[in-house]
Image (cartoon, rainbow, N blue to C red):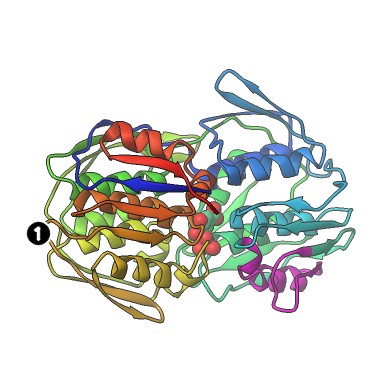
Amino acid sequence: MRRFRIEPGGHLQGEVQVPGDKSVSHRAVMFAALASGTTRVTGFLESADCLATLAAFAAMGVAHRREGNALVIDGVGLHGLQAPDAPLDLGNAGTSMRLLSGLMAGQAFDSVLTGDASLSRRPMARVIEPLTRMGADIRGDAAGRAPLHIRGGRPLRGITYRPPVASAQIKSCVLLAGLYADGETRIEEPGVSRDHTERMLAAFGVPLRRGDRRVALQPVERLRAADVAVPADLSSAAFFMVAASIAPDSELRLPGVGINPTRRGVIDILLAMGADIVLGNEREQAGEPVADIRVRSAPLKGIAIGGDQVELAIDEFPAIFIAAACAEGTTRLTGAAELRVKESDRIAVMADGLATLGVDVTVAEDGLTIVGRPQAPSFGGGHVASHADHRIAMAFAIAALRADAAITIDDCDYVDTSFPGFVSVAAAAGLAIRSERAAS
Ligand code: S3P
């Protein structure tokens, strides 16, 4: 097991090339595999999560190779996947398991989806329920968790599904099953969730009807291979946006970052807190909006965060909480109970770590309240448990920029699930971080 040790203080300067978007990389592999023809994916995130998706498709007969900086995938067509010899192990990747459950429900063969300890604790009833309504035979354990056993060869029918929570993973799961269903599949969400699936399906030639929080898909004969240029991941960039905001005398450039409107909540929340963030060179890349982002140090103020803002920044709250702890006044997050079922319970785990570092934090069922300390040091030093959650580890790493003593963080191997190379990228930007081997 690796642990991070970060000495206090530092300024961040220069350009940070954040790796590719995790959500888009997963989908690129899936749609490329199902397409007729060959797809070139550039900017693919070579992280443990996305490599688990790639390995799952390799186990189902989908060939891929690296050509220069491109991942090249030979699609087998909508009905060309082969039965895998063994359970598909998706590691830590919730996106992979939930999207694949919909896809596997439409296959002619049986499959089993497994994952690591964290993924095996996460709720899967949210995909079992709609898939069962579509006619799938899919079973988890008694508590509706992985491993998921899926029987193939079941005819699926299109349904209108209104999920209880806005979730791109549920929506995408149902849409993938809908590719194999009889009739139209409709989803009506209670809030806005990220729309990478819709954008990429359209790029692969699948017509969708889209409205406000609604999407409808008709089954198609084939997906048409389409090259994908994956933007840099805003969720990874978020750590550097907060880091450059809270560290004095800092200025960072983050080129080519995805700013999809269904994802950009972290930018708007930080701007509302007073951050100095400027987007430049806005353009479109493979159906996704991207921009070059410039961030400079700025005094932050606490704000109230809730409602629609939550899903738009769902993965960025660990970083936002660090910003809140450095802000003038109080930040209160509500309506964010979904954070409790991410790679860890991000409300409890962040609150524990913040309290360990001396921050005044109060926990509620659906959020928390943080009283900021705008005068450095905002954090004491200490030892924080990441609970094997990549984003918890990276959030507490950047807290050291405003701490008065070193911070150490346990269980940091999981950072590779979304941000391989984080330590060297962060060190090059000015964070005094090193990775050490710890007795497990
Ligand atoms: C994701 C959707 C989000 C997000 C996850 C990736 C996706 O989950 O938290 O990291 O790629 O579809 P929910 O849509 O379930 O909130």
Q: Secondary structure at mark 1?
A: loop
- Which residue is located at x 76 percent, y 62 percent? 183
User: Relative to residue 144, is residue 333 drawn left or right?
Assistant: left
Q: Is residue 63 above or below residue 125?
A: above
**Residue sitting farthest toward the front:** 439
User: Relative to residue 329, is residue 130 drawn left or right?
Assistant: right
The reply to whether the magenta stretch includes residue 205 is no
Which corner quadrant holds the C terminus?
A: bottom right
Packing grade of label 1 (10 A; few <14, some 14-19, many >=20) is few
User: Relative to residue 230, is residue 125 drawn left or right?
Assistant: right
Q: Residue 333: x percent and y percent?
A: 31, 72
Quarter of the image for residue 294 reads top left
Q: Residue 71: x percent and y percent?
A: 62, 28
Magenta residues, as a range?
Answer: 119-148
Which residue position holds label 1? 375
Q: Is residue 322 above or below residue 129?
A: above
Quarter of the image for residue 46 reads top right
Amino acid type at mark 1 = Gln
The reply to whether the magenta stretch includes residue 135 is yes
Q: Residue 325: x percent and y percent?
A: 22, 63
Q: Is residue 315 above or below residue 163?
A: above
Quarter of the image for residue 378 reads bottom left
- Which residue is located at x 74 percent, y 44 percent? 56
Looking at the picture, tell me which residue is in the foreground, 233 or 168.
233
Instruction: Look at the image and tell me whether residue 283 can be seen.
Output: no
- Which residue is located at x 19 percent, y 52 percent? 402
User: Mark 1 near ligand 1 (CB under 8 Å)?
Assistant: no
Q: Residue 225: x percent and y percent?
A: 67, 33
User: Relative to residue 261, is residue 247 drawn left or right?
Assistant: left
